Each structure stands twice: as structure tokens, then as C-alpha cells.
Amino acid sequence: MTLTVPTTYKALTEETAIALAKTVHTFDPAAQLTCREIGDGNLNYVFQIEDPKTGKRLIIKQALPYAKIIGESWPLTLKRATIEANVLRKHGEFVPSLVPVVYATDEELAITVMEDLSHLEIAREGLINGKNFPRLSQDIGEYLALTLFHTSDYGLHPFEKKRLAAEFSNPELCKITEDLIFTDPFFDLDTNDYEPQLQTAAEAVWSDRKLQLEVAKLKKSFLTESEALLHGDLHTGSIFASQTETKVIDPEFGFYGPIGFDVGLFLANLIFQSITREGENRQVIVEDIGKTWNVFAYSFAELWKKQSVESFKETDGYLEYVLGKVLTDVAGFAGCELIRRTIGLAHVKDLDSIEDTKNRISSKKQALKTGQALILQRQEIASIEDLLQILEEARI
Ligand code: SR1
Ligand code: MG
């Protein structure tokens, strides 16, 4: 695929990032600003600018015209920078304390200037190091309920909802998800990446006809259900956290999709932790999984009762039907995320960083087994306890 990069686009350097920061923020004009490139994601550059005298900082994030994880052979639209900034702004209307402030954007340079969050740490890193974040499940449960309800037909006039769905059309980034989460890991393709010890387990995924049919159905939901403005890539690497704060970053995959997708991706990334931990430490994560769902479902139901614009909102059983469908989807989407992060192109450090080979392979096999079980048994899940039971039964 060829891509037209605007002639004015130029990749920032640390020097040009500083010059840019001076034009958009109120640093002292005489300040000797410093700059570090701190991006560790798959796609973008992230520059942190600081005035060492005052400690004042900001972030300039720049999209590259290709995927950093692969290189220039994988062109990628720069429009994702605008999508990301606009999702942050839209979600910020409903959860201002849970997303960074966007100070400025430049569409042609594909940059977003935003609040620095380096007093927090990436949740995935902390969790891998055995930390717990007491606010994480409460905050993410609320983030999910508020952002998803208020951008859906349950909370918006249909004209505004359809206007937003058009504004947040994000075909190129959705295609990555369609391929990397819903297609490639379920076929024997070169894009997949796994250790030789997982060959038999990977072949079992590729030859399971029932699993393929269920994944096809989940992919169809992702392709066709324009329910709410999703974050689109809500894993624990997209969340900054501390003991007292949570901030969701990086919604460049944002688009109108099925509500269960964001919830499912987040829960899957907690499930990786439930696989790698033991004893009490594991129990904390299991409780976080349950609490995230319960906070989400309770907050969504309260919003529905108090603010829904849907004519059928008081029809007996309708809210329960909607939340029941979301929970079924959550299990399925979480299952796909568990499988793709284990044998697909983009992995998670939670599993890859396990040094002991036997332990790492066994954890990866458990992730595959859990993913398959969640996808195949999702129609039987009537409560979060049922989902947690599936995690227990898949333990190796
Ligand atoms: C080529 S991008 C690979 C993965 O990184 C992003 O964070 C998304 O999860 C995507 O699937
Ligand atoms: Mg990201």
C-alpha cells in the first residue's frame, strides 16, 4: 500500500521538538529546555520536553508514516494522530480525570502536544514487577461505562451519534486489528510469531473448525457493530497508573465498534497477569477482573436509568439483554486477544519476559487454552463469576 505523506511532514528530532514546544506552551523563553525520546510502543515517537529549572514538562507525540515495530515496509496513515487527539478530547468530556489534557495538535506534522504523565508508570510494567494498583479496576470500570455509554445510541441523539461515527472512521487502524487480532493468529501465516515449543498448540488453534467459526462471528461483530466510540487498543500498556491515579492514553485505534471490545481487551491483559502470578498476588488480579466488570456494569446501568435517550429503556429485560450481550462479547474478544498476543505478531511482555523457558512455555499454553475456552464457551457465560470459573478450569 502506498501512502501520501504531506510535503510539510517532517519527522521531529530532539532539537525541533524543543523548538516546537516553545511555540505551544508557556515555558520561560530563556529556559534551557531538554528533550528525550521515550516512546516504547509499536508505532510512534514520544518526546518528553522539560524545563530542568522548574520541572515543568510536556509530551509531544508524533505518528510516523509507517509502523515502528516493522519498519518502512509497513506504511501507516498519519491520520491516526488526529483520531487519537480527538478521541482523547471526546472521552475527556466524560472522564476528564482519567485521560491526559491535549494542549495542541498539528494534523500535517501528525503531532499531539499533551500533558506529561511521567509521575505515573505504565500499568503493564508495574504489574509485571508485582505491583498492584488499588484504583485501576474502579477507574477503568468507570472509564469504560462513561465513555461507552455517552457515545452510544443509549446516551446520544441519533444524528450526533452518526456524525461521530463518521468522524471517527478509522479504516487503516481497524484493518490492523482485523488482521492481527481476528484473522492471522487463526491461520498458519508468516506474520505469526511463536516459539517452536508452541508449534503443536498453534496447530491445534488453526485446525479447530469450531473455534474458527466462533472467531469469524466475533470478527463480524467488530466489523459491523458501530455501537460506541471505543479506545480500540485498551491494553495495560495504554494505561498510566499509580497508587492514587489512573490515566488512559494512546487511543489511536479509536473508532465506532462493539462495546465489549474495549472491556474484553482490558480484561484479557489482566488475565495475562492472572496466568503469571501465584497465590495471593494472583487473587488480587482475579478480584480486579471481577471488580472491573462489576463497576462497568453498575455504572452503565445507572447511566441507562438516569440518562438514557432510548425509548425502550424501561422495557423489562432490555438493559439486561444489552449487558448480557456485552459480557458474552467480552469473553470472546478477550479470548482473541489472549491468543493473538501469544502466537500472533505483537506480543506482551507479561509472557515474553518470563526467563525460565519451561515456565514461559507453560504460561503461553495456558493463555492459548484460556483464550480458546473463553471463545468457545462464551454463550454459556451469564455472570462475571462464570467467566472467572473458565479461567480457573483452564489453569495448567
Ligand atoms: C503493528 S501494530 C501492533 C499492535 O500494536 C498496537 O498497540 C496494537 O495493539 C496493534 O495490534
Ligand atoms: Mg498504542
Image (cartoon, rainbow, N blue to C red):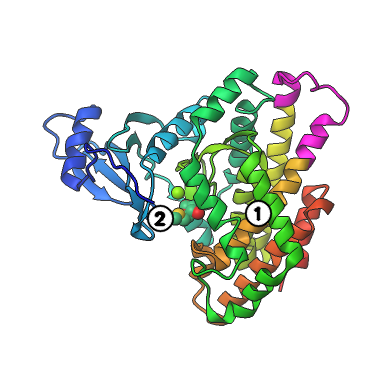
Mark 1 and mark 2 in contact (Cβ < 8 Å)?
A: no
Q: Is residue 1 magenta?
A: no
Span highlighted in magenta in the image: 303-324
Residue farthest toward the right in the current orientation of the protein: 316
- Is residue 131 at all visible to an observer of this figure? no
Distance in Å between CA atoms under marks 2 and 1: 20 Å
Residue occupied by mark 2: 42
Residue farthest toward the left in the current orientation of the protein: 30
Residue at (11, 32) in percent of width and height: 30
The image shows residue 101 at horizontal and vertical percentages of: 40, 31
Quarter of the figure with residue 271: bottom right
Q: Quadrant of the C terminus?
A: bottom right
In the rendered structure, the answer to whether residue 158 lies left or right of residue 214 reads left
Residue kind at label 2, given as amino acid type: Asn
Count the marks.
2
In the rendered structure, the answer to whether residue 161 lies left or right of residue 62 reads right
Mark 2 surroundings within 10 Å by alpha-carbon count, few (fewer than 14), some (14 through 19), many (20 or more): few
Label for residue 334? 1
- Secondary structure, mark 2, is loop
- Secondary structure, mark 1, is helix
In the rendered structure, the answer to whether residue 125 lies left or right of residue 262 reads left
Residue kind at label 1, given as amino acid type: Ala
- Judging depth in this view, the residue of 56 and 208 nearest the camera is 208
